[in-house]
């Protein structure tokens, strides 16, 4: 006869962002817990809630994320959903092939092809059955960035509407519903209020940490912060006789308190070394040294500005000197050098501005506190903003010039900048202006293209990377 109460264990990670220092401990802990729970006859599932990959790490960059998938396989994950780092920092082809070797499900209900079909590697939801006959419904959703996804050839749908539709389909087929949500804490709270049938929301995206979970009505929210600092554990006790979830508890385990082994550091170092080796490919020959300069103009900044303008046919460029995390030496430049220089998953963006708006932008760029501003998130992988560089745009005798031509108030100009500046945090006028994101090319890809063009005898280029 079955026990009246059975336990289901959910282990979860989120927003690792390719921080692998704790990964050996995490993998060992997860496989050990799975073995222990299964030996007790208790169901156990392991989930990742997205942004496991981050192209700022050489191992992820060099393997286009497939190395991360291998790590998830080795730790025995049952299912994942994607975050924005999987979704919009990879080309469509790279994402379509990312999970080819996955031994787990990719569960995601709000990413589709333009014709409304799901990609072959996606399951909008999955119902797992335990040895006790319980039906565990799992659904996943990721944050909606429609402009970015559409530029990459995807259709991203509004997650709350997609989840309402899917959970309504699942409700009669399941005994409980778990949501893998890469939507952020505020969206998770709204979701819990809107959809009563969700028992647990495993969260991500905003890097929030709930050490003992958070309750919204009868829904338990759980999340583990970022960078592999914690692993989450949710225990669900189910009353078989009355067919209901009897109890829910959330906790986290600090990874720095997990047992270490001598080989752990070697494994993390090995991933770095292997990643760097994959990037040791010559890209172009650099004719002069271009050192890093954080608080002023430099040859490196001029080179970068010219690359952006040449690639996008813009009139002028705006970016920050803190973008460069190293310099470029004279001689052959490799993919590894470019990755060290510009590790950010940042795309160029062309913004259409009137001359009047350009003048306003110029004045905003002179704010004396900007260079010392600490920047977090937005794809930026540095620390300080550094000097704001306005390439080909200058003020002379109180007249704003592009090159030698006077900027006219009612003329429209093409400004190329970084996608992070279009979100409005530093330059609000860029948020609503007409714009075109250049994707899937990251800024280091544009530098690679420009360096190759300069290497050619005739110096000509084209408008797409090969």
Image (cartoon, helix red, strand yellow):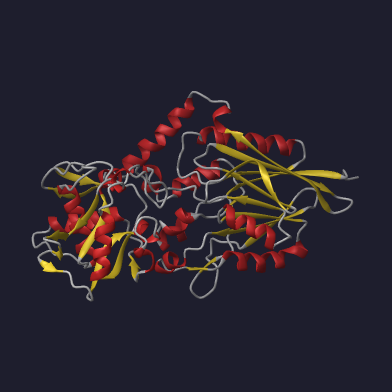
Residue 106 seen: no
Q: Position of residue 126 (x, y in %)?
A: 66, 59
Q: Is residue 358 found left or right of 39 in the rendered image?
A: left
Identity of the residue drawn at 77% across and 36% down: 40
In the rendered image, the quadrant that contains the C terminus is: bottom left
In the rendered image, the quadrant that contains the N terminus is: top right
Q: Pick the residue in front: 49 or 436.
A: 436
Q: Position of residue 413 (x, y in %)?
A: 23, 71
Q: Is residue 139 found left or right of 395 in the rendered image?
A: right
Considering every residue shown, the one lying at the far right of the view is: 1
Q: In the picture, residue 19 is in which quadrant?
A: top left
Identity of the residue drawn at 51% across and 42% down: 226
Q: State whether residue 463 is above or below residue 215.
A: below
Q: In the picture, residue 272 is in which quadrant?
A: top left
Q: In the picture, residue 386 is in which quadrant?
A: top left
Identity of the residue drawn at 62% across and 55% down: 188
Q: Is residue 5 found left or right of 140 in the rendered image?
A: right
Q: Position of residue 174 (x, y in %)?
A: 76, 59
Residue 109 seen: yes
Q: Pick the residue in front: 328 or 130.
A: 328
Q: Position of residue 61 (x, y in %)?
A: 37, 48
């Amino acid at each position: 006869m079955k026990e009246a109460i059975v336990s289901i264990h959910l282990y979860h990670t989120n927003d690792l962002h390719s921080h692998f220092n704790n990964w050996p401990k995490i993998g060992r802990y997860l496989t050990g817990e799975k073995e222990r729970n299964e030996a007790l006859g208790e169901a156990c599932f392991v989930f990742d809630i997205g942004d496991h990959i981050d192209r700022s790490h050489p191992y992820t960059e060099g393997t286009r994320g497939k190395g991360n998938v291998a790590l998830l396989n080795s730790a025995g994950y049952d299912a994942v959903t994607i975050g924005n780092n999987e979704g919009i920092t990879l080309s469509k082809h790279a994402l379509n092939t990312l999970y080819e070797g996955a031994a787990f499900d990719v569960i995601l209900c709000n990413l589709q092809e333009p014709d409304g079909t799901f990609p072959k590697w996606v399951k909008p939801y999955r119902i797992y059955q335990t040895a006790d006959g319980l039906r565990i419904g799992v659904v996943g959703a990721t944050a909606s960035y429609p402009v970015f996804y559409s530029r990459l050839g995807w259709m991203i749908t509004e997650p709350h509407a997609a989840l309402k539709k899917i959970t309504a389909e699942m409700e009669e087929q399941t005994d409980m519903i778990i949501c893998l949500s890469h939507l952020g804490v505020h969206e998770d709270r709204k979701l819990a209020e809107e959809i009563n049938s969700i028992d647990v929301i495993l969260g991500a995206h905003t890097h929030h940490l709930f050490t003992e979970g958070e309750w919204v009505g009868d829904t338990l929210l759980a999340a583990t912060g970022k960078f592999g600092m914690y692993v989450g554990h949710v225990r669900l006790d189910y009353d078989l006789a009355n067919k209901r979830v009897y109890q829910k508890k959330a906790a986290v385990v600090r990874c720095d308190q997990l047992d270490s082994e001598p080989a752990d550091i070697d494994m993390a170092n090995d991933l770095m070394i292997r990643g760097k080796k994959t990037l040791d490919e010559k890209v172009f020959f650099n004719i002069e040294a271009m050192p890093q300069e954080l608080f002023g103009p430099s040859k490196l900044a001029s080179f970068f500005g010219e690359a952006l303008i040449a690639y996008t046919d813009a009139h002028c460029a705006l970016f920050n000197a803190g973008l460069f995390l190293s310099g470029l030496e004279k001689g052959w430049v490799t993919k590894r050098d470019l990755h060290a220089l510009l590790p950010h998953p940042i795309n160029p963006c062309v913004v259409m501005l009137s001359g009047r708006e350009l003048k306003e932008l110029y004045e905003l760029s002179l704010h004396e506190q900007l260079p010392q501003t600490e920047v977090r998130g937005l794809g930026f992988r540095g620390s300080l903003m550094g000097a704001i560089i306005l390439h080909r745009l200058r003020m002379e005798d109180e007249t704003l010039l592009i090159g030698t031509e006077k900027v006219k108030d009612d003329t429209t100009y093409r400004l190329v900048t970084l996608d992070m500046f279009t979100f409005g945090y530093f330059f609000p006028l860029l948020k609503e202006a007409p714009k075109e994101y250049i994707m899937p090319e990251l800024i280091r890809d544009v530098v690679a293209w420009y360096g190759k063009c300069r290497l050619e005898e005739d110096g000509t280029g084209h408008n797409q990377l090969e």
